[in-house]
Image: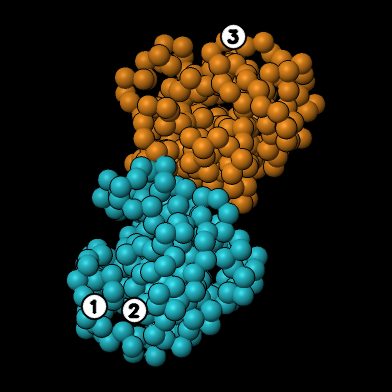
Chain colours: A orange, B cyan
Amino acid sequence: MRVLVIGANGKVGKHIVSKLHKSEHEPVAMVRDPDQVPQFEEMGISSVLGNLEKDFESAFYKIDAVIFAAGSGPDTGADKTILIDQEGAIKSVERAKHFGVHRFVMLSSMAADRPEAGPSGLKHYLYAKHRADEFLKQSGLNYTIVRPGGLTDEPGTGLVKLQEHMNKFGEIPREDVADSIVHLLSVPKAEFKSYDLISGDQSINELLL
Amino acid sequence: MRVLVIGANGKVGKHIVSKLHKSEHEPVAMVRDPDQVPQFEEMGISSVLGNLEKDFESAFYKIDAVIFAAGSGPDTGADKTILIDQEGAIKSVERAKHFGVHRFVMLSSMAADRPEAGPSGLKHYLYAKHRADEFLKQSGLNYTIVRPGGLTDEPGTGLVKLQEHMNKFGEIPREDVADSIVHLLSVPKAEFKSYDLISGDQSINELLL
């Protein structure tokens, strides 16, 4: 599949693009800034310019699947949480549907399915992610929602714990999140499902097989 | 009807409560802070404590209609825009549905139906209002959404312009917004409809009759 990675320049996004490039799929890295293009071109990876706050329709040309991994990050205000994490995701779902994309995998966040239980400083973020996830679920698109625990920059271990609902919080390296997302992209049992994801002892390559 | 006014202590909310009190309806003023109760009690108006970020289920006891007029205001961050303007409204719709409320009038904002066209500093706010309005429209509740232009503190004139979609922006006194909302609450033609609202030359008392 030709897979559009939205938020390809992000910390998880870069891992996703690189994992896809080594898989049977073909990544198309969507980035906002022309300066972000060469790093992908040098690896022989296609890229496309698109701004979630403006226009990014042309990014969907000949795309079979979408992975949404964009986020406004911790250095911007909550206005960007609405505009990127919530509305950018919702617009991506709308465009994917419009252009007949077959598959949509959303990088969400642990507790986005129960934001009221989140820590007070994170609640607004969790609600924004929640609204985007709900929009995807009701879109009719073939979706998988992945809600990882606390993200770390540790190297991937290839071992995780994936479960529809988890009672305990945990951490997970960004690389393992990316690996899990790329794996789940073509796993039939993951279709129309949502999962919590932390480090564990299940081999990513065998998840839901 | 017994009408729960959510955001009763706000600038528009106070006008709404007062107009309802003079109408055939009975207002129930929902406020967050016990200090906000006496002003209503002194006028013989019922009030109830409820916090949109926490619990306010008990406010819906024996309520026939809800007017949502709460807003986080300009002095708080965009995190509160998510938690109050968007999620507070969405929770109010959910609770109203759960408790079998017959009618829901939403105080929205001009351009909330096309946030992408709004000024950049306001976009996140308009998207938050947009999501709440969309949630109400899809809830199955008997709704009216009112999207006023720029709010002023001028005294009401009793004259407005109400239209499903308006091409030009305008202003309107908060008192006229309150008056229009109370009027539309029991006008059958306003059911399941959304309107822009600015100052004009239509008499509020005759709107959609």
- Does A23 sit above or below residue A92? above
Q: For residue A108, which numbered disc appears in the image? A: none
Counting the numbered discs, the total is 3
Give the chain letter at badge 3. Answer: A
Residue behind mark 1: B156
Residue behind mark 2: B179
Tell me how far mark 3 sits from mark 1, CA to CA.
64 Å
What x and y, as percent, mark residue A22? Answer: 59, 14
Tag 3 and tag 2, C-beta contact below 8 Å: no
- Mark nearest the camera among 3 and 2 is 2
**Neighbours of disc 1 within 10 Å: few (<14), some (14-19), many (20+):** some
Which numbered disc flags the more N-terminal residue, 1 or 2? 1
Q: Name the secondary structure under disc 1.
A: loop
Tag 1 and tag 2, C-beta contact below 8 Å: yes
- Does A84 sit above or below residue B171? above
The residue under the point 46% across, 59% down is B34
Q: Nearer the viewer, residue B105 or B64?
A: B64
Residue behind mark 3: A155
**Neighbours of disc 3 within 10 Å: few (<14), some (14-19), many (20+):** few
Kind of residue at badge 1 = Gly
- On whether disc 3 and disc 2 are found on a single subunit, the reply is no
The answer to whether one can see residue B106 in this image is no
The residue under the point 61% across, 32% down is A110
Tell me how far mark 1 sits from mark 2, CA to CA.
8 Å
Q: Nearer the viewer, residue A120 or B97?
A: A120
Residue B90 left/right relative to B61: left
- Mark nearest the camera among 3 and 1 is 1
Tag 3 and tag 1, C-beta contact below 8 Å: no
